Every structure is written in C-alpha cells, then in structure tokens.
Amino acid sequence: MIRIIKKMSMTAFLGAIIFMVIQITSDLYLPTLTSDIIDKGVTKGDTSYIMHVGLIMIGISLIGIVASVFNTLIASREAQKLGKRLRSEIYEKVEFASHTEFEKIGTASLITRTTTDVNQIQMVSQMFLRLMINAPITLIGASVLAYSRDPELTKIFLYIMPALIIIVGGIMYFAVPLFKSLQLKTDKLNLVFREGLTGVRVIRAFNQTIFEEKRFDDANKDYTQTAIKVNTLMSFLLPIVTLIISITNVSIVWFGGHNVAEGSLEVGTMMAFMTYAMQILMSFMMMTMIFIFVPRAQASAVRINEVLDLKNDIENKNEVKELTGDKNLLFHDVEFSYPGAEKAAITQIDVSVKSGETLAIIGGTGSGKTTLINMIPRFYDVTKGSLKVNNQNVKEVDQVALRDRIGFVPQKAVLFTGTIRSNMLYSFPEATEDDIWKALEIAQAKEFVLELSEGLDSIVEQGGSNFSGGQRQRLCIARALIKPADIYIFDDSFSALDFKTDALLRKALKESVTESIVVIVAQRISTVVEADTILVLDNGAMVGKGNHQELKETNETYQEILTSQLREEEIA
Ligand SMILES: Nc1ncnc2c1ncn2[C@@H]1O[C@H](COP(=O)(O)OP(=O)(O)OP(=O)(O)O)[C@@H](O)[C@H]1O
C-alpha cells in the first residue's frame, strides 16, 4: 500500500496535510471559544464580549471551512490522478509482459484489478488524505483538551472506550475477512460473465444456456450472500456508535450537571467537554473505518503490485540494434518447454531457410507448430539451442528491431475496432493507398472490400465480428503483407479459406514475396506442397524435413497425413 501511496505527488500530499491541520486546529479551538462565550459572556451578560468572541468564532469557522474545502479538493484530485496512473501502469505492464507472465494472472482477473482494485485504492487514498491524519490528531487533541477542562469527567471514557473497542473490534473481526473474500468473488463473477459473453455462440450451439445461467447464478449468489453478510455486520456499526455517543452525552450531563450544581464546573466548560467527547468518539469511528478499509485496500494493493511486478522474462538485450544483412532464419537444436510443463513442447528442431524460400510446418493438433513459430518474434524464448534471424541470435537483438522485420498472422484472426483502412495501417502506418490495395489483392481480399459501399473506410466492429471467418483471415493476411518484412509468418492462416482461394493466395504470395522468407503453418498438404522445406512435427519432435516429393517417398508421418487427406478429398 505504501508503495502505491508513494506514487502521489509530494506537493499535493503536503498541501492536503497543511489544510487538514488548519481544519483540525479550528475544530479543536471552537469548543473552547464556545465555553468562553457561555461562561464569560452569557452568564455574566457581557454583550460586547459575546460579540467579540462570536466574531472570532465566525472567522475561525470560515477558515476551517475553507481549509476543509481545499483539503477535500486536493484529496479527491490526487486520488483520481493516482487511479489514472495505476490504470496506465497496469495497462503498460500487461502490454509489455511476456506471454508466460500474462497467462499467470489471466484476463478476467486483470480486468478486475484495473477496475475494482484501482477504485478501492482510489477511495482509500482519498480517505488517507482526508481522514487518516485527521482522526488520530483529533483524537489526541480532543482528549488532551477534554482532560484539561475536567480530569474527573474524562474518567467516563475509561468505561466508554473499552466498550466501544470490544463492539467495533468484534464487528471488524468478522467483517475484514468477508471484505477480502468479496474481492475474490468479484474476480470469479467477472470470469464467469466474461466466458459467458465471449463464448455465447458455443453456449447456444450446445444448448448450454441453462447450465451457464446456473453457473453465473451460483457465482452471483455467492457474491451477493457475502456482500449481504458484510453489509449486515456493518449496518450495526452506526447505530451502536450513535447509542454510545448518546450514553456518553447523558453521562456527561448527569455527572457534569452535579458538578455544575455544586459550583465546581461551569456550564460552558461542560458544553465544551461534550463537544470534545463527540470529537473523540467520532475520530475513533473514523479510525475504525480506516481499519476496515485499509486491509481491503491492502489486498487490492497486493493484487495491483503483482501486476506491476510482472517481469518480461524475455530480456531485451539490445546488443544488436538493427537487423540488416542477408535474410535467413536458422533453428539450431531448438527446444522449448512451457513453464511447469512436464515435457518439452518442441525438441531438436534443426532447420535453415534462406531469402525467398518458404518453410512449411505441418503436423497434427498439439504437435507444437504454433509454439515453434512463436519463438521467432520471441513471444517465448527457446529453452535450449539457438534461433537466428539474419545471422543474429534473436536473444541479442533489440525486440523492436526484431519484430520490425516480421509480418505476423496469428492463428486467431484479430481485427481492431475501426475501419479496414485503420486495420491495414496498423502494421505499417506509412503505407499508401496503393500498398493497401496491393496487399488486399495478394490476400484475395480486394474483391470483397471493393464490393463494400465504403470500401477501405468500411467499419470493422469489435473483433471484426461483421466479417466472415475467411474474410477476417484474409484481412489479417493483408495487414501483415503491407509491412515490408524479412519474414512473413502465417499461423494456420489459410485454414478458413476454400481450396481455390487458398491456392490463389499462395500463388500471389509466391509471385510478390520473392526476397523474404515465408513461414507457413498448415494442416492441409495442399497448402504446403510447394514449400521449399517442409517440417513434419509429431508430438513436439521433428520427425521429417524435406520437400513434398522427398517426404512423400520417405516419411511415414507425412505419408499418413497425405493418405488421410487424399481419402478425405476422395470422399468429398
Ligand atoms: N500457453 C501454454 N501453456 C502451456 N502449454 C501450452 C501452451 N500453449 C500450448 N501448450 C502446449 O504445447 C503443445 C503444443 O501446442 P501448440 O499450440 O504449439 O500446437 P499446434 O501444433 O500449434 O496445435 P494446433 O494445430 O491445434 O494449433 C500442446 O501440448 C499444448 O497443450
């Protein structure tokens, strides 16, 4: 928490404290003046004294009000600024964290951390600037002043305070763990809600709407029950404290009244004492609230710090600032294991590709194809062996420089909200209109874009949902091709295309990309048949390497894939 609070501006922090101290001084001084005005003015009928002290009281009240307004203003501004800063830092971290680190926390929890947890911190930091210093100072100040007015009467607190501590402590004892579990339940609720939204089509297709509704209801009920429990507990707090304040006031009037009757205490002093008593109890209440909210914010702070501490275990060594020279790609005895996995996802990968050549990777699902190509832009780092691009070990190349030389089409076609043009310029903002059309033509997307009334300015909705799977894939391919790159990577990007479009696209690709390296991950033999080198993967191991003809004649796994697909085509 302290680490997060430190992110606040020191000047604003000091400003808030100065205004708060002014406010507290005014609050503590006013009851003394009230006592004076009664004891020295009202009881003695001294009008000019009443006027004089009255004016001072108005002045001090005004100063107190102005100080309080400024303190509140600074506190809320600073809390909002802190929230903004935390959200930005979390977003930045998530954007730059490695895939492994990112997967550790998960999307749903990251969203809760950026919203609910940051709001918690915002609220507590505002409280911190408003109350956390105010409450203890007022408590001490009011106690000292009350004692100085009447030490005998102060003994009332010897009975009141323990009662208050036991009751409030008891409530907190049960409420604090409930507040913590409420945060975890918010995470769970977000996770189920998010899955329900993103997977809505699958849920409907499998008629699992009722099951999902129940799952959501359970999470919702669980959250609500905890929230009701904690709120019920908290609802006792205010009436109990009000009751205690009333008992205190009655006790002061009872015992103080006797003293006044005996002449050992003045009425004004008794009234001032009552105000101090009120301040003591209220500041105690404030401190209780702080004790309730701080552990909640502490839990949020831990969750936020977890994100802020995410490290990019893909170290950016920066030794090679630019990737120039001959274009080539070299895997030497490459192995990779996902953290915590029992066995390596890929092993003993040895292959080299030169400028203008195509490398195809084929294999069953889960055989390690995506893992292998994810090594090239360093989404993950090889755990053994080496991977070189343009004769440079990728681990030594500046990440921006490396990714600058790569055109990447992921397995899942991801488009951003905007227009086709904005999506196309995403990979290479300097691209001209001609460049865009040329890339769309190679990607076999020109025709359908031309048919749209707005052309390149047609709207792309969230996730590209207003385009078909095949159209989305082709737009993603065009986006990668717009960028001048040394290596173009297509991760199963032709799978949603029909055989004819797939063939036309590969032909256009071969004609236009003559100098760069093309890496194609595919399931279909027809997609890889013209590649210069085909890697056959099975269960993470490279079980074959060669061109189509060689593999067809010698490689058993390749032959199996070929036969199974020929049969499929024959059946079709
Ligand atoms: N993020 C991850 N964390 C842990 N294990 C993973 C992760 N991604 C993939 N794996 C595992 O690594 C292996 C290879 O997965 P990979 O996605 O590379 O296969 P693939 O050949 O591309 O499959 P597909 O054709 O189905 O996309 C699988 O056993 C998979 O369970």
Image (cartoon, helix red, strand yellow):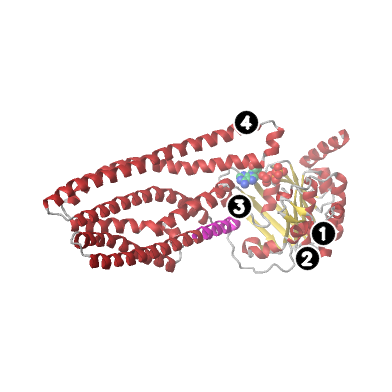
Residue 56 relative to residue 312: left or right: left
Q: Amino acid at mark 4?
A: Phe
- Among the two numbered marks 3 and 2 on one chain, the one whose residue lies closer to the N terminus: 3
Tag 3: amino acid: His
The residue pinned by badge 2 equals: 431
Q: Earlier in the sequence, mark 4 or mark 2?
A: 4
Element carrying mark 1: helix
What residue span does the magenta drawing correspond to?
A: 82-98
Identified at 13% across, 50% down, the residue is 261
Sooner in the amino-acid sequence: mark 4 or mark 1: 4
**Which quadrant holds the N terminus?**
bottom left
Is residue 104 something one can see in this rendering? Answer: no
Residue type (three-letter) at the residue carrying disc 1: Ala
Q: Secondary structure at mark 4?
A: helix
Query: Spatial distance from mark 4 to mark 1, Cα to Cα?
Result: 45 Å
Which residue has dot 4 on it?
211
Asked if residue 104 lies left or right of residue 501, the reply is left
Which mark is on residue 6?
Answer: none
Q: Which sits earlier in the primary sequence, circle 2 or circle 1?
A: 2
Q: Residue at x 28, y 42 (%)?
A: 166
Where is residue 361 shown, x and y percent of the image? 75, 49
Rendered image: mark on residue 99: 3
Local crowd size for mark 4, using a 10 Å CA cut-off: few (<14), some (14–19), many (≥20): few
Q: Disc 3 to disc 1, how far (Cα)?
A: 29 Å
Q: Quadrant of ligand 1?
A: top right
Name the residue beneath numbered marker 1: 439
- Observer-nearest residue: 405 or 269? 269
Secondary element at tag 3: helix
